[in-house]
Amino acid sequence: MTPMRDLVTAPSRREDFLGRGSWDGATLAGRVAELAERRGDVVAVVDETGQRHSYSELAGGAGRLAAQLRERGVDAGDVVSVQLPNWYEAAVVAVAGLELAALTAFPSKGVYPFYTLDFLAVEAVCICGALLARRGRAGAPLVAFFALWGLASLVAYVVPTPFGGNLTRLNAFIFPIMLLTASLAGFRPRGLTAFALAGAIAYNLTPYLLLVPYRLDNRPASSSFWRSPIDFLHLHSGPGFRVEVVPTAAHWESYWLPRAGLPLARGWYRQLDMVDNPILYAKHLQPAAYRRWLRSVAVKYVVVPRTVLDPDGAAREARLVDSRSSGLVLAYRGKNWVIYRLPRATPLLTGPGAAVITSFGHEVIAGRVSTPGTYFLRAHYSRYFKLHGRGCLKPGPGSMTNLVLRQPGFFRVAIVASPDAVLDASLSSHSASC
Protein backbone atom coordinates (compact mmCIF):
# COMPACT_ATOMS: atom_id res chain seq x y z
CA MET A 1 0.00 0.00 0.00
CA THR A 2 1.18 3.57 -0.66
CA PRO A 3 1.67 5.65 2.52
CA MET A 4 -0.67 8.63 2.78
CA ARG A 5 2.10 11.19 3.07
CA ASP A 6 3.47 10.27 -0.40
CA LEU A 7 0.08 10.93 -1.96
CA VAL A 8 0.21 14.58 -0.87
CA THR A 9 3.58 16.01 -1.84
CA ALA A 10 7.31 15.41 -1.53
CA PRO A 11 8.90 16.12 1.90
CA SER A 12 11.30 18.69 0.39
CA ARG A 13 8.44 20.59 -1.19
CA ARG A 14 6.45 20.46 2.05
CA GLU A 15 9.40 21.89 3.98
CA ASP A 16 9.70 24.61 1.34
CA PHE A 17 6.02 25.52 1.77
CA LEU A 18 6.42 25.70 5.54
CA GLY A 19 9.64 27.70 5.32
CA ARG A 20 8.16 30.30 2.95
CA GLY A 21 4.99 30.60 5.03
CA SER A 22 2.83 29.30 2.19
CA TRP A 23 1.35 26.64 4.46
CA ASP A 24 0.92 26.52 8.23
CA GLY A 25 0.69 22.73 8.49
CA ALA A 26 -3.11 22.70 8.87
CA THR A 27 -5.06 19.93 7.15
CA LEU A 28 -8.32 20.24 5.26
CA ALA A 29 -10.14 18.12 7.85
CA GLY A 30 -8.76 20.24 10.69
CA ARG A 31 -9.75 23.47 8.99
CA VAL A 32 -13.29 22.22 8.31
CA ALA A 33 -13.66 21.12 11.96
CA GLU A 34 -12.44 24.53 13.17
CA LEU A 35 -14.87 26.41 10.91
CA ALA A 36 -17.73 24.07 11.85
CA GLU A 37 -17.18 25.04 15.48
CA ARG A 38 -16.77 28.79 14.92
CA ARG A 39 -19.01 29.40 11.88
CA GLY A 40 -21.12 26.27 11.62
CA ASP A 41 -24.06 27.91 9.81
CA VAL A 42 -21.94 29.53 7.09
CA VAL A 43 -22.21 27.96 3.62
CA ALA A 44 -19.15 25.78 2.91
CA VAL A 45 -20.07 24.07 -0.38
CA VAL A 46 -22.20 25.06 -3.38
CA ASP A 47 -22.08 22.28 -5.97
CA GLU A 48 -23.00 22.26 -9.64
CA THR A 49 -26.57 21.14 -8.86
CA GLY A 50 -27.14 24.23 -6.71
CA GLN A 51 -27.07 22.40 -3.36
CA ARG A 52 -25.81 24.59 -0.50
CA HIS A 53 -24.36 22.99 2.63
CA SER A 54 -22.90 24.54 5.79
CA TYR A 55 -19.62 23.73 7.52
CA SER A 56 -21.56 21.88 10.23
CA GLU A 57 -23.23 19.66 7.63
CA LEU A 58 -19.92 19.03 5.86
CA ALA A 59 -18.09 18.15 9.09
CA GLY A 60 -20.95 15.92 10.27
CA GLY A 61 -21.24 14.02 6.99
CA ALA A 62 -17.49 13.55 6.73
CA GLY A 63 -17.26 12.28 10.31
CA ARG A 64 -20.00 9.71 9.77
CA LEU A 65 -18.43 8.47 6.53
CA ALA A 66 -14.96 8.26 8.12
CA ALA A 67 -16.34 6.23 11.01
CA GLN A 68 -18.12 3.84 8.63
CA LEU A 69 -14.95 3.31 6.60
CA ARG A 70 -13.01 2.64 9.79
CA GLU A 71 -15.61 0.10 10.93
CA ARG A 72 -15.32 -1.66 7.56
CA GLY A 73 -11.61 -2.25 8.11
CA VAL A 74 -10.00 0.65 6.23
CA ASP A 75 -6.67 1.30 7.94
CA ALA A 76 -3.58 3.46 7.69
CA GLY A 77 -1.90 3.09 4.29
CA ASP A 78 -5.02 1.77 2.54
CA VAL A 79 -6.08 3.55 -0.63
CA VAL A 80 -9.75 4.53 -1.01
CA SER A 81 -10.48 5.57 -4.59
CA VAL A 82 -13.68 7.47 -5.40
CA GLN A 83 -14.71 9.27 -8.58
CA LEU A 84 -17.58 11.75 -8.30
CA PRO A 85 -18.84 14.75 -10.26
CA ASN A 86 -18.59 18.26 -8.84
CA TRP A 87 -21.19 17.45 -6.17
CA TYR A 88 -21.45 18.07 -2.44
CA GLU A 89 -20.78 14.36 -1.85
CA ALA A 90 -17.32 14.77 -3.37
CA ALA A 91 -16.41 17.32 -0.67
CA VAL A 92 -17.73 14.98 2.03
CA VAL A 93 -15.56 12.13 0.74
CA ALA A 94 -12.47 14.34 0.55
CA VAL A 95 -12.80 15.53 4.15
CA ALA A 96 -13.81 12.06 5.37
CA GLY A 97 -10.60 10.56 4.01
CA LEU A 98 -8.54 12.90 6.16
CA GLU A 99 -10.77 12.33 9.18
CA LEU A 100 -10.27 8.60 8.69
CA ALA A 101 -6.54 9.17 9.02
CA ALA A 102 -7.20 10.89 12.35
CA LEU A 103 -9.39 8.00 13.53
CA THR A 104 -6.60 5.60 12.63
CA ALA A 105 -3.97 7.70 14.40
CA PHE A 106 -6.10 8.33 17.49
CA PRO A 107 -8.26 5.22 18.03
CA SER A 108 -10.97 5.37 20.67
CA LYS A 109 -10.56 3.15 23.74
CA GLY A 110 -14.00 3.95 25.08
CA VAL A 111 -17.36 2.24 25.09
CA TYR A 112 -20.87 3.59 24.63
CA PRO A 113 -23.61 2.38 26.98
CA PHE A 114 -26.43 0.15 25.78
CA TYR A 115 -29.15 0.34 28.39
CA THR A 116 -31.37 -2.66 29.08
CA LEU A 117 -34.66 -0.90 28.31
CA ASP A 118 -33.27 0.29 24.96
CA PHE A 119 -32.12 -3.23 24.17
CA LEU A 120 -35.49 -4.77 25.06
CA ALA A 121 -37.31 -2.18 22.94
CA VAL A 122 -35.14 -2.96 19.91
CA GLU A 123 -35.62 -6.70 20.30
CA ALA A 124 -39.42 -6.38 20.69
CA VAL A 125 -39.67 -4.25 17.54
CA CYS A 126 -37.44 -6.66 15.59
CA ILE A 127 -39.48 -9.72 16.64
CA CYS A 128 -42.78 -8.05 15.69
CA GLY A 129 -41.35 -6.81 12.41
CA ALA A 130 -39.90 -10.18 11.45
CA LEU A 131 -43.18 -12.00 12.26
CA LEU A 132 -45.14 -9.54 10.11
CA ALA A 133 -42.61 -9.55 7.26
CA ARG A 134 -42.77 -13.36 7.00
CA ARG A 135 -46.46 -13.07 6.09
CA GLY A 136 -46.01 -10.46 3.38
CA ARG A 137 -45.36 -10.65 -0.31
CA ALA A 138 -41.64 -10.14 -1.08
CA GLY A 139 -41.03 -9.76 2.65
CA ALA A 140 -37.67 -11.54 2.72
CA PRO A 141 -35.54 -8.34 2.68
CA LEU A 142 -37.51 -6.96 5.62
CA VAL A 143 -37.14 -10.23 7.53
CA ALA A 144 -33.39 -9.97 6.95
CA PHE A 145 -33.38 -6.32 8.09
CA PHE A 146 -35.16 -7.03 11.39
CA ALA A 147 -33.08 -10.16 12.00
CA LEU A 148 -29.78 -8.36 11.41
CA TRP A 149 -30.79 -5.36 13.53
CA GLY A 150 -31.87 -7.62 16.37
CA LEU A 151 -28.71 -9.74 16.16
CA ALA A 152 -26.40 -6.72 15.95
CA SER A 153 -28.16 -5.17 18.96
CA LEU A 154 -27.74 -8.39 20.93
CA VAL A 155 -24.01 -8.48 20.19
CA ALA A 156 -23.60 -4.76 21.04
CA TYR A 157 -25.52 -5.26 24.30
CA VAL A 158 -23.43 -8.25 25.41
CA VAL A 159 -20.03 -7.03 24.14
CA PRO A 160 -19.20 -3.39 25.14
CA THR A 161 -18.02 -1.35 22.14
CA PRO A 162 -17.69 2.35 21.19
CA PHE A 163 -20.83 1.87 19.07
CA GLY A 164 -23.06 0.45 21.81
CA GLY A 165 -26.53 1.94 22.10
CA ASN A 166 -26.07 4.02 18.96
CA LEU A 167 -27.71 1.06 17.18
CA THR A 168 -31.03 2.28 18.58
CA ARG A 169 -30.84 5.38 16.38
CA LEU A 170 -32.50 3.41 13.60
CA ASN A 171 -35.68 4.05 15.55
CA ALA A 172 -35.96 7.35 13.65
CA PHE A 173 -37.12 5.31 10.64
CA ILE A 174 -38.90 2.41 12.31
CA PHE A 175 -42.52 3.54 11.95
CA PRO A 176 -42.45 3.95 8.14
CA ILE A 177 -40.55 0.66 7.85
CA MET A 178 -43.10 -1.11 10.06
CA LEU A 179 -45.97 0.49 8.10
CA LEU A 180 -44.46 -0.84 4.87
CA THR A 181 -44.07 -4.27 6.47
CA ALA A 182 -47.70 -4.28 7.61
CA SER A 183 -48.96 -3.20 4.18
CA LEU A 184 -47.05 -6.03 2.48
CA ALA A 185 -48.70 -8.43 4.94
CA GLY A 186 -52.14 -7.03 4.13
CA PHE A 187 -52.42 -5.62 7.68
CA ARG A 188 -53.06 -9.14 8.98
CA PRO A 189 -53.23 -10.63 11.50
CA ARG A 190 -54.89 -7.56 12.92
CA GLY A 191 -53.80 -8.08 16.51
CA LEU A 192 -50.11 -8.43 15.64
CA THR A 193 -50.34 -5.56 13.14
CA ALA A 194 -51.93 -3.22 15.68
CA PHE A 195 -49.39 -4.15 18.35
CA ALA A 196 -46.43 -3.77 15.96
CA LEU A 197 -47.56 -0.39 14.60
CA ALA A 198 -48.36 0.95 18.07
CA GLY A 199 -44.97 -0.21 19.35
CA ALA A 200 -43.18 1.23 16.33
CA ILE A 201 -44.77 4.67 16.61
CA ALA A 202 -44.11 4.75 20.36
CA TYR A 203 -40.48 3.71 19.80
CA ASN A 204 -40.23 6.31 17.01
CA LEU A 205 -41.58 9.20 19.09
CA THR A 206 -40.42 8.44 22.63
CA PRO A 207 -36.78 9.61 22.17
CA TYR A 208 -38.00 12.95 20.81
CA LEU A 209 -40.51 13.36 23.63
CA LEU A 210 -37.77 12.67 26.18
CA LEU A 211 -35.75 15.54 24.69
CA VAL A 212 -38.50 18.09 25.32
CA PRO A 213 -37.44 18.93 28.92
CA TYR A 214 -33.87 19.49 27.75
CA ARG A 215 -34.98 21.95 25.08
CA LEU A 216 -37.18 24.02 27.38
CA ASP A 217 -34.13 25.73 28.91
CA ASN A 218 -31.77 26.95 26.18
CA ARG A 219 -29.81 29.34 28.42
CA PRO A 220 -26.63 27.21 28.44
CA ALA A 221 -26.29 27.81 24.68
CA SER A 222 -25.70 31.50 25.35
CA SER A 223 -22.36 32.98 26.42
CA SER A 224 -24.12 35.22 28.98
CA PHE A 225 -25.16 32.15 30.98
CA TRP A 226 -21.49 31.27 31.54
CA ARG A 227 -20.10 34.76 32.11
CA SER A 228 -20.30 34.79 35.93
CA PRO A 229 -18.60 31.44 36.59
CA ILE A 230 -15.95 32.14 33.94
CA ASP A 231 -15.14 35.52 35.53
CA PHE A 232 -14.95 33.90 38.98
CA LEU A 233 -12.71 31.06 37.79
CA HIS A 234 -10.38 33.42 35.93
CA LEU A 235 -9.95 35.35 39.18
CA HIS A 236 -9.56 32.43 41.60
CA SER A 237 -8.37 29.38 39.64
CA GLY A 238 -5.39 29.14 37.31
CA PRO A 239 -3.67 27.00 34.67
CA GLY A 240 -2.34 24.72 37.40
CA PHE A 241 -5.79 23.26 38.12
CA ARG A 242 -8.76 21.88 36.21
CA VAL A 243 -12.44 22.68 36.67
CA GLU A 244 -15.20 20.11 37.07
CA VAL A 245 -18.59 21.22 35.75
CA VAL A 246 -21.55 18.96 36.50
CA PRO A 247 -22.62 18.29 32.88
CA THR A 248 -25.55 20.17 31.39
CA ALA A 249 -28.03 18.35 29.15
CA ALA A 250 -26.36 19.45 25.91
CA HIS A 251 -22.81 19.63 27.38
CA TRP A 252 -22.36 23.33 26.57
CA GLU A 253 -19.71 23.54 29.30
CA SER A 254 -17.40 21.62 26.95
CA TYR A 255 -17.59 24.54 24.53
CA TRP A 256 -17.71 27.71 26.62
CA LEU A 257 -15.12 26.98 29.32
CA PRO A 258 -12.29 25.70 27.06
CA ARG A 259 -13.02 28.64 24.76
CA ALA A 260 -12.36 30.89 27.77
CA GLY A 261 -9.07 29.10 28.45
CA LEU A 262 -10.28 27.05 31.43
CA PRO A 263 -9.23 23.36 31.38
CA LEU A 264 -12.00 20.90 32.20
CA ALA A 265 -11.69 17.69 34.16
CA ARG A 266 -13.57 15.81 31.42
CA GLY A 267 -15.16 16.37 28.03
CA TRP A 268 -18.45 15.54 26.35
CA TYR A 269 -17.32 12.33 24.59
CA ARG A 270 -19.17 9.77 26.72
CA GLN A 271 -17.34 6.74 25.28
CA LEU A 272 -14.07 7.97 26.78
CA ASP A 273 -15.59 9.51 29.90
CA MET A 274 -17.11 6.19 30.98
CA VAL A 275 -13.70 4.50 30.71
CA ASP A 276 -11.58 7.28 32.25
CA ASN A 277 -14.02 8.30 34.99
CA PRO A 278 -16.21 5.27 35.81
CA ILE A 279 -16.86 6.51 39.36
CA LEU A 280 -19.19 9.19 37.97
CA TYR A 281 -21.41 6.54 36.35
CA ALA A 282 -21.60 4.23 39.38
CA LYS A 283 -24.98 3.65 40.96
CA HIS A 284 -23.77 5.08 44.28
CA LEU A 285 -21.31 7.99 44.41
CA GLN A 286 -19.49 8.14 47.75
CA PRO A 287 -18.11 11.47 49.07
CA ALA A 288 -14.61 10.18 49.88
CA ALA A 289 -14.27 8.47 46.50
CA TYR A 290 -15.48 11.62 44.75
CA ARG A 291 -12.89 13.78 46.53
CA ARG A 292 -10.15 11.29 45.61
CA TRP A 293 -11.25 11.51 41.98
CA LEU A 294 -11.21 15.32 42.07
CA ARG A 295 -7.63 15.30 43.38
CA SER A 296 -6.54 12.65 40.87
CA VAL A 297 -7.47 14.95 37.97
CA ALA A 298 -6.25 18.17 39.63
CA VAL A 299 -9.66 19.80 40.21
CA LYS A 300 -9.82 22.83 42.51
CA TYR A 301 -13.35 24.11 41.81
CA VAL A 302 -16.59 22.24 41.10
CA VAL A 303 -19.33 24.15 39.28
CA VAL A 304 -23.01 23.19 39.59
CA PRO A 305 -25.27 24.85 37.00
CA ARG A 306 -28.92 25.42 37.87
CA THR A 307 -30.39 24.11 34.64
CA VAL A 308 -31.40 20.79 33.12
CA LEU A 309 -28.51 18.35 33.63
CA ASP A 310 -27.22 15.40 31.64
CA PRO A 311 -29.38 12.32 32.38
CA ASP A 312 -26.42 9.98 32.93
CA GLY A 313 -25.21 10.58 36.47
CA ALA A 314 -25.18 14.39 36.55
CA ALA A 315 -28.12 14.75 38.96
CA ARG A 316 -26.48 12.26 41.34
CA GLU A 317 -23.21 14.21 41.23
CA ALA A 318 -25.02 17.53 41.79
CA ARG A 319 -26.83 16.15 44.86
CA LEU A 320 -23.57 14.97 46.36
CA VAL A 321 -21.75 18.25 45.66
CA ASP A 322 -24.60 20.27 47.21
CA SER A 323 -24.68 18.07 50.31
CA ARG A 324 -22.71 18.71 53.50
CA SER A 325 -21.06 15.31 53.21
CA SER A 326 -19.21 16.32 50.04
CA GLY A 327 -16.40 17.97 52.02
CA LEU A 328 -16.40 20.90 49.58
CA VAL A 329 -16.47 24.56 50.62
CA LEU A 330 -19.01 26.99 49.16
CA ALA A 331 -17.11 29.59 47.12
CA TYR A 332 -19.81 31.36 45.08
CA ARG A 333 -23.57 31.32 44.83
CA GLY A 334 -25.55 33.05 42.10
CA LYS A 335 -28.92 32.84 40.39
CA ASN A 336 -27.78 30.19 37.90
CA TRP A 337 -24.65 28.82 39.53
CA VAL A 338 -23.11 27.42 42.68
CA ILE A 339 -19.33 26.96 42.82
CA TYR A 340 -17.53 24.88 45.46
CA ARG A 341 -13.82 24.70 46.33
CA LEU A 342 -11.98 21.48 47.16
CA PRO A 343 -9.74 22.00 50.22
CA ARG A 344 -6.10 20.98 49.71
CA ALA A 345 -6.59 20.52 45.99
CA THR A 346 -3.82 18.68 44.14
CA PRO A 347 -2.21 20.65 41.28
CA LEU A 348 -1.60 19.33 37.78
CA LEU A 349 2.16 19.05 38.29
CA THR A 350 3.89 17.73 41.41
CA GLY A 351 7.42 16.49 42.04
CA PRO A 352 10.64 16.87 43.99
CA GLY A 353 10.74 20.67 43.68
CA ALA A 354 8.47 23.64 43.28
CA ALA A 355 6.45 23.22 40.07
CA VAL A 356 4.21 25.73 38.32
CA ILE A 357 2.04 25.27 35.23
CA THR A 358 2.01 28.53 33.26
CA SER A 359 -0.14 27.38 30.33
CA PHE A 360 -2.46 24.40 29.90
CA GLY A 361 -4.27 24.07 26.57
CA HIS A 362 -5.36 21.53 23.98
CA GLU A 363 -2.02 21.62 22.16
CA VAL A 364 0.58 22.93 24.63
CA ILE A 365 1.38 22.45 28.33
CA ALA A 366 4.06 24.78 29.65
CA GLY A 367 5.55 25.45 33.05
CA ARG A 368 8.69 25.70 35.15
CA VAL A 369 10.34 23.70 37.94
CA SER A 370 12.86 24.67 40.60
CA THR A 371 14.97 21.52 40.51
CA PRO A 372 15.64 18.56 38.15
CA GLY A 373 13.83 15.28 38.71
CA THR A 374 10.80 13.22 37.79
CA TYR A 375 7.52 15.14 38.00
CA PHE A 376 4.02 13.72 37.81
CA LEU A 377 1.86 15.47 35.23
CA ARG A 378 -1.85 14.73 35.63
CA ALA A 379 -2.53 14.57 31.91
CA HIS A 380 -3.10 11.31 30.05
CA TYR A 381 0.12 10.16 28.41
CA SER A 382 0.16 10.19 24.62
CA ARG A 383 2.72 8.97 22.14
CA TYR A 384 2.09 12.25 20.33
CA PHE A 385 3.53 14.33 23.20
CA LYS A 386 6.86 16.01 22.50
CA LEU A 387 8.98 17.65 25.20
CA HIS A 388 10.80 20.85 24.28
CA GLY A 389 13.59 21.05 26.83
CA ARG A 390 16.20 18.78 28.39
CA GLY A 391 14.48 15.63 29.52
CA CYS A 392 11.95 13.07 28.35
CA LEU A 393 8.40 11.77 28.80
CA LYS A 394 7.12 8.35 29.79
CA PRO A 395 3.84 6.76 30.93
CA GLY A 396 3.05 7.22 34.60
CA PRO A 397 0.59 5.69 37.09
CA GLY A 398 -3.07 5.76 36.12
CA SER A 399 -2.22 6.33 32.43
CA MET A 400 -0.90 9.79 33.33
CA THR A 401 2.52 11.23 32.38
CA ASN A 402 5.90 11.21 34.08
CA LEU A 403 7.93 14.25 33.09
CA VAL A 404 11.66 13.65 33.54
CA LEU A 405 13.49 17.00 33.57
CA ARG A 406 17.28 17.17 33.66
CA GLN A 407 17.58 20.86 34.50
CA PRO A 408 15.52 23.49 36.35
CA GLY A 409 13.65 26.21 34.53
CA PHE A 410 11.00 26.29 31.86
CA PHE A 411 9.66 23.34 29.86
CA ARG A 412 7.07 22.91 27.14
CA VAL A 413 5.10 19.79 26.16
CA ALA A 414 3.33 19.98 22.80
CA ILE A 415 1.27 17.71 20.61
CA VAL A 416 3.16 16.93 17.41
CA ALA A 417 1.70 19.12 14.67
CA SER A 418 3.38 17.76 11.55
CA PRO A 419 1.20 15.36 9.49
CA ASP A 420 4.28 13.20 8.90
CA ALA A 421 5.05 13.05 12.63
CA VAL A 422 1.46 12.07 13.48
CA LEU A 423 1.44 9.32 10.85
CA ASP A 424 4.86 8.01 11.90
CA ALA A 425 3.78 7.92 15.56
CA SER A 426 0.53 6.13 14.77
CA LEU A 427 2.26 3.45 12.70
CA SER A 428 5.24 2.90 14.99
CA SER A 429 5.20 0.51 17.91
CA HIS A 430 4.37 2.20 21.21
CA SER A 431 7.40 3.11 23.28
CA ALA A 432 8.21 5.75 25.81
CA SER A 433 10.51 8.57 24.75
CA CYS A 434 12.94 7.91 27.61
Image: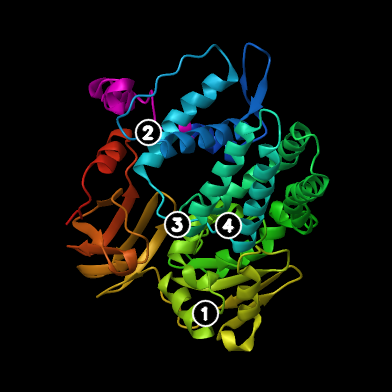
The residue at which mark 2 appears reads as 74
Q: Quadrant of residue 105?
A: top left
In whole angstroms, how far apart are the C-alphas of marks 4 and 3? 35 Å
Secondary structure state at the residue bearing disc 2: loop
The residue at which mark 1 appears reads as 342
The residue at which mark 4 appears reads as 257
Tag 4: Cα neighbours inside 10 Å, few (<14), some, or many (≥20)? many
Q: Are marks 1 and 2 in contact (CB under 8 Å)?
A: no
Q: Position of residue 58 (x, y in %)?
A: 58, 30
188 relative to 259, above or below: above
Magenta-highlighted residues: 1-30
The residue sitting at 76% across, 51% down in the picture is 199
Q: Are marks 4 and 2 in contact (CB under 8 Å)?
A: no
Q: Amino acid at mark 4?
A: Leu
Looking at the magenta stretch, what is its main secondary structure? helix
Nearer the observer: mark 3 or 2; the answer is: 3
The residue at which mark 3 appears reads as 159
In whole angstroms, how far apart are the C-alphas of marks 4 and 1? 19 Å
18 relative to 163, above or below: above
The residue sitting at 63% across, 58% down in the picture is 120
Whether residue 261 is visible:
no
Secondary structure state at the residue bearing disc 1: loop
Q: Amino acid at mark 1?
A: Leu
In whole angstroms, how far apart are the C-alphas of marks 3 and 2? 22 Å
Q: Nearer the N terminus, badge 3 or badge 1?
A: 3
Nearer the observer: mark 4 or 2; the answer is: 2
In whole angstroms, how far apart are the C-alphas of marks 1 and 2? 46 Å
Q: Nearer the N terminus, badge 4 or badge 1?
A: 4
Q: Amino acid at mark 2?
A: Val
Tag 3: Cα neighbours inside 10 Å, few (<14), some, or many (≥20)? few
